[in-house]
Image: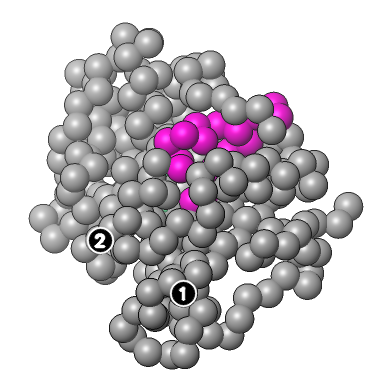
Amino acid sequence: MPRIAYVNGRYVNHSDAAVHIEDRGYQFADGVYEVCEVRHGVIVDLTRHLDRLNRSLSELRIAWPMTRSALILVIRETLRRNHVRNGLFYLQVTRGVARRDHVFPPAGTPSSIVVTAKSTDQSVIAKKNASGIKAITVRDNRWDRVDIKSVGLLPNAMARQQAKEAGAQEAIYIDHHGMVKEGAATNVWIVDHDGNLVTRPAEHGILRGITRTTLMDVAAKLGVTIVERFFSVEEMMEAREVFITAATSICFPVVSIDGETIANGHPGSMSQKIREAFFDVAEKTAI
Ligand code: PDD
């Protein structure tokens, strides 16, 4: 089946899709993105993802490429053209095309927009949920505006590669005080010895994940207490459970970190309970 991408006003074959060589996303990583899950034929948490897109754009003073309602039409059309029922869409907005110069291009330069969509293999996700994943810890070497979902992901890509070479699937960033931050593309959670769900406050050098926010609604429904506080690597290693969240994976149990087994080495019950309740609680938008 041909894949279709939306690029600056046109639906094109994925293999022919291209942006200009002087797009500022290409030259300066001057852009932002969103990744949003599609499950059972509906878009999950679209409003929150577009609200965060709006925040990322305004923090960087990049103009919306079109109205919000027009963008929703484009997203739905891209999903339809790619026949996605279980998968994701990716959208990227950059400051547009201009002669290379660090300062912003002249006012009125249109932003660039790309939307792609793909189906994901549900059996791969199910396998990771059943067996859990491995992680490594790495020192955070990113800029201090990681609250913006910027396309400048080189440190994240380096960290994920390091994880892969260590036989793991995620790298968990640690701050200068030995406290856990987040994964290279996920938020990190533990279940502490009181049975509370613990995650780092989003105001302190992490991305405010949409899955993280919706998970808080899920926990409230399940009667689970969430505590937003700092926690150390040592506490994580001794936690009852560790798991990671992102729109691409909802929540994957972590059963080994830096080669050490977490709890009994099997996925815990909390992440499973949350995963099962998540879709009911999340916002669902028809394609
Ligand atoms: N990553 N932290 C980082 C650094 C991330 O890149 C992501 C998402 C998250 C989780 O956010 P959300 O729940 O909104 O997906 C946390 C996306 C999926 C990616 O880069 O592919």
| Res. 91 visible in picture | yes
Task: Give SS at disc 1.
Answer: loop
Q: Earlier in the sequence, mark 1 or mark 2?
A: 1
Give the image location of residue 115, x and y in percent.
62, 56
Identify residue type, mark 1: Thr
Q: Amino acid at mark 2?
A: Arg
Residue 224: image quadrant is top left
Residue 70's disc number: none
Kindly give the residue lying farthest to the bottom in the view shown. Answer: 100
Nearer to the camera, 31 or 247: 31
Q: Is residue 63 magenta?
A: no
Horizontal relation, residue 271 to residue 4: left or right? left
Residue at x 18% of width, y 57% of height: 175
Residue 145 - label: 2
- Residue at 54% x, 67% y: name it: 112
User: Image height check: is 181 above or below 238?
Assistant: below
Q: Furthest residue to the left?
A: 177
Q: What range is drawn magenta here? A: 34-50
Image position of 231 with respect to 107: above or below: above
Q: Nearer the viewer, residue 54 or 139?
A: 54
- Residue 230 drawn at (x, y percent): 15, 40
- Residue shown at 28%/53% (left/top)? 147
Q: Residue at x 78, y 72 (%)?
A: 16
**162 or 54, which is in the foreground?**
54
* Front one among 150 and 140: 150
Circle 2 Cα neighbour tier, 10 Å, few/some/many (<14 / 14–19 / ≥20): few
Q: Secondary structure at mark 2?
A: loop
Q: Quadrant of residue 11?
A: bottom right
Q: Which residue is mark 1?
A: 109
